[in-house]
Image (cartoon, rainbow, N blue to C red):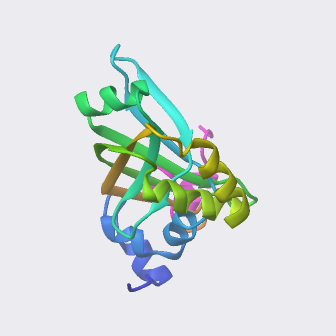
Amino acid sequence: MHTLTHEELAALPQGDVRLLDCDIAQNLLTSTELARVAYVAADATPRVFAMLFHWTGHEVVLSTFVPAGKIAALRARPEAAITIDRAAAQPQALLLRGRAQVTEMDGIVPEYVLALHRYGGAEQAAAQVAAVDVPGVRMARIAVQPSWVGVLDFQTRFPGGSTADEFARRGQA
């Protein structure tokens, strides 16, 4: 993987999947920040839910237990948007869009275990897996391969594609 320089990053438009190679994206994809996933529910209204996630290097994998309502909703309307962000003095945000592929499976989704390890460490992950890994458990693996990527760092990349000067003047007549 080639990590983008600041100049290369600045030259890429929002939406370019090569933004996944920048430090901000990679740091957020391996962080313990939650992924906020947006989709359209069965009643045609928008939903957002925060979830643990695992980045495989190609797709964001989310896991849920069957029969969660989001499973049918994402099968019917697989378009999803994901935000992974860090609130700080210099906030950072990774914005992803793609189609969710939902696969139901018997047992625990392997990426769920990997996410538990990243978020809570080996001991906590083992305890959480032991609590849910019972005979008959079914989970759904929700995989989103980004087809659109946006990065905001509020230093070189701003909302709406604005420049630093334009962003500083926001709200002024």
Q: Quadrant of residue 89?
A: bottom right
Which image quarter holds the C terminus?
top right
Q: Is residue 160 left or right of residue 121?
A: left
Q: Is residue 9 left or right of residue 105?
A: right
Residue at the extreme front: 135
Q: Is residue 49 left or right of residue 168?
A: left
Residue 14 shows in the view: yes
Residue 65 x %, y %: 46, 36
Which image quarter holds the N terminus?
bottom left
Residue 32 shows in the view: no
Q: Quadrant of residue 105?
A: top left
Q: Residue at x 45, y 82 (%)?
A: 7
Q: Residue 23 in magenta?
A: no
Residue 53 x %, y %: 51, 53
Q: Which residues are magenta?
A: 157-173
Residues 168 and 139: in front is 139
Q: Residue at x 40, y 67 (%)?
A: 56
Q: Residue at x 53, y 63 (%)?
A: 114
Residue at the extreme right: 89
Residue at the extreme top: 43
